[in-house]
Image: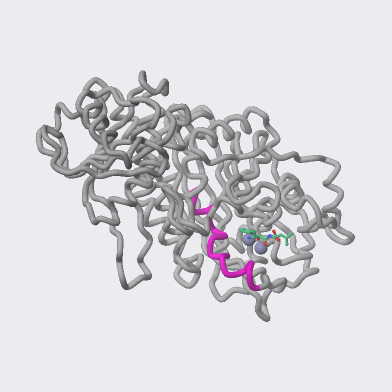
């Protein structure tokens, strides 16, 4: 639970107060905090420089029993991300010391020259996202999340920003849910199981959830999706989640790649690339978790989300390189590489969404290509779109939340690389270069929705190292991005 509080309405003593301090100037407005900061800076080991930290106990007339001062460096560098990182780091520190509550002093808008909205939203994001441990499969539980986190603001800001605080917490809980699903190993999240986890999480919300089983997917002729799942003992599913708003003027479809394990299929991945492939359902996780958040946020737009869930495995039944299938769209696809499976499940989900709902806007999110990671690294997603305004909305949401999306081109000229000798299209490019682009172009050949965006999150969906507000594993990248984008698209 995260709440905004002021020192005035806090009558009981705070156990732990964390204060961010800048080295060059005072960034707080509260008199008591200013006094505390002065005291901390009398110690030579603390001047507010980055990474510096000092804890003082039982200060006379202090509002808190224990005050942790954390250096942020120069105030000029203060922005959303430094505040997010500060809160995430502070939460981790509190968890290590087994605190169950903490209060954070929010810097003052006038003193910092940053909007209160930005300060509070970023602090809540960092605290909420940092307050998370994935230890389900570990006997020894070292850390546990804090039960209560308060952000201390001036009395006049408590009420006006309460709704923002609630909203931010809901979206961040979505991110945590997506992370949890991504971190579950593939032997515990086969398509059927994952579909159940998603439906369960979505139940009791203002959402309609339907899961298509293998028989229904066959009846619908989703042969591209089925081809990917052929080699697996675990049958495929497709989860469809509907959110409706009575004042909606637009309908957006979200599509999330849900490969619960990507072995590569008959084109088996080598060691080094295969062991992380439980994260290949990160697009589906982000999409489903975003839907759960928007059921509470209630933006004035209709949204239907499609999560095709499959496991890509080699076996005697598996699809072979060279096989040709007829996708739901009617177009035939020559599957030259069974490791380019994401695009196959996505095209059937795209066509299904269009046939059933004819949306105005479509956004797909997928850990689609290693080539996108080569191009943009592990922190930045590739953004492809046929619509400049839609791309701008997504980019802006990305910047605001530090889920950066870099626009990439969709050149017509490269479409010929997907020409097949014997089918309507082939699933890999005939050139080894520009793989993120040719994958996006492959999808574009099946998209009829006027405004479409594809977000390749192969890089930022997961992280090897624990950072300030995200542990190692799934990052939940895309949840905040989608929630903010949908709110801007009404
Ligand atoms: N799931 C992978 C992409 C991926 C790579 C996700 C790294 C997360 C981290 C995707 O299905 C894949 O295997 N793509 C191939 C495409 C190739 C065969 C054209 C790739 O990127 O190598
Ligand atoms: Zn693959
Ligand atoms: Zn994949």
Which of the two residues, 314 or 465, is positioned nearer the viewer here? 465
Residue 210 in picture, x, y percent from top left: 46, 54
| Residue furthest to the right | 421
- The secondary structure that most of the magenta stretch takes on is helix
Do we see residue 208 in this rendering? Answer: no
Magenta highlight on residue 16: no
Displayed-image quarter of ligand 3: bottom right
Span of residues in magenta? 271-287
Which of the two residues, 98 or 255, is positioned nearer the viewer here? 98
Residue 264 in picture, x, y percent from top left: 66, 68
Residue 20 in picture, x, y percent from top left: 33, 36
**Is residue 107 positioned above or below 212 on the image?**
above
Magenta highlight on residue 274: yes
Q: Quadrant of residue 5?
A: top left
Residue at 31% from the left image edge and 70% from the top image edge: 140
**Is residue 471 positioned above or below 395 on the image?**
below
Which of the two residues, 490 or 213, is positioned nearer the viewer here? 490
| Residue furthest to the front | 44
Do we see residue 169 in this rendering? Answer: yes
**Is residue 154 positioned above or below 177 on the image?**
above
Residue 307 in picture, x, y percent from top left: 53, 53
Residue at 47% from the left image edge and 31% from the top image edge: 77
């Amino acid at each position: 639970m995260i709440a905004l509080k002021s020192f005035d309405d806090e009558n009981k003593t705070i156990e732990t107060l964390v204060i961010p301090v800048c080295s060059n100037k005072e960034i707080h407005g509260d008199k008591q905090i200013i006094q505390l900061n002065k005291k901390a800076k009398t110690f030579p080991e603390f001047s507010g420089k980055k990474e510096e930290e000092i804890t003082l106990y039982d200060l006379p007339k202090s509002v808190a029993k224990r005050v942790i001062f954390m250096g942020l460096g120069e105030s000029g560098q203060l922005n959303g991300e430094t505040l997010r990182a500060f809160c995430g780091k502070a939460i981790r520190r509190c968890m290590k010391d087994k605190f169950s509550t903490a209060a954070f002093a929010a810097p003052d808008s006038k003193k910092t020259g940053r909007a209160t909205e930005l300060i509070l939203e970023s602090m809540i994001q960092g605290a909420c996202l940092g307050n998370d441990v994935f230890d389900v499969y570990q006997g020894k539980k070292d850390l546990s999340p804090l039960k209560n986190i308060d952000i201390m603001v001036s009395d006049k800001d408590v009420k006006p920003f309460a709704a923002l605080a609630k909203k931010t917490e809901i979206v961040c809980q979505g991110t945590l849910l997506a992370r949890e699903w991504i971190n579950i190993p593939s032997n515990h999240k086969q398509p059927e199981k994952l579909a159940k986890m998603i439906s369960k999480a979505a139940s009791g919300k203002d959402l309609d959830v339907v899961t298509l089983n293998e028989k229904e997917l066959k009846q619908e002729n989703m042969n591209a999706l089925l081809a990917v799942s052929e080699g697996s003992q675990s049958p495929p599913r497709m989860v469809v989640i509907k959110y409706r708003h009575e004042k909606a003027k637009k309908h957006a479809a979200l599509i999330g790649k849900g490969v619960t394990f990507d072995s590569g299929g008959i084109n088996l991945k080598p060691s080094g690339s295969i062991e992380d492939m439980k994260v290949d359902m990160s697009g589906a996780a982000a999409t489903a978790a975003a839907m759960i958040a928007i059921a509470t946020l209630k933006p004035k737009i209709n949204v239907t989300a499609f999560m095709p869930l499959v496991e890509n495995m080699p076996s005697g039944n598996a699809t072979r390189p060279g096989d040709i299938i007829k996708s739901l769209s009617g177009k035939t696809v020559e599957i030259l590489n069974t490791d380019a499976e994401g695009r196959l499940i996505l095209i059937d989900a795209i066509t299904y969404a269009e046939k059933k709902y004819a949306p105005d806007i479509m956004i797909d999110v997928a850990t689609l290509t290693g080539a996108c990671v080569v191009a943009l690294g592990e922190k930045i997603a590739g953004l492809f779109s046929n619509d400049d305004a839609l791309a701008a909305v997504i980019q802006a949401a990305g910047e605001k939340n530090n889920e950066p999306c870099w626009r990439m081109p969709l050149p017509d000229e490269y479409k010929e690389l997907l020409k097949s000798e014997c089918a309507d299209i082939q699933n890999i490019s005939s050139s080894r270069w520009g793989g993120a682009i040719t994958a996006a172009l492959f999808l574009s050949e099946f998209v009829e929705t006027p405004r479409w965006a594809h977000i390749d999150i192969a890089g930022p969906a997961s992280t090897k190292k624990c950072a300030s507000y995200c542990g190692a594993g799934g990052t939940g990248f895309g949840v905040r991005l989608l929630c903010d984008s949908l709110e801007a698209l009404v």
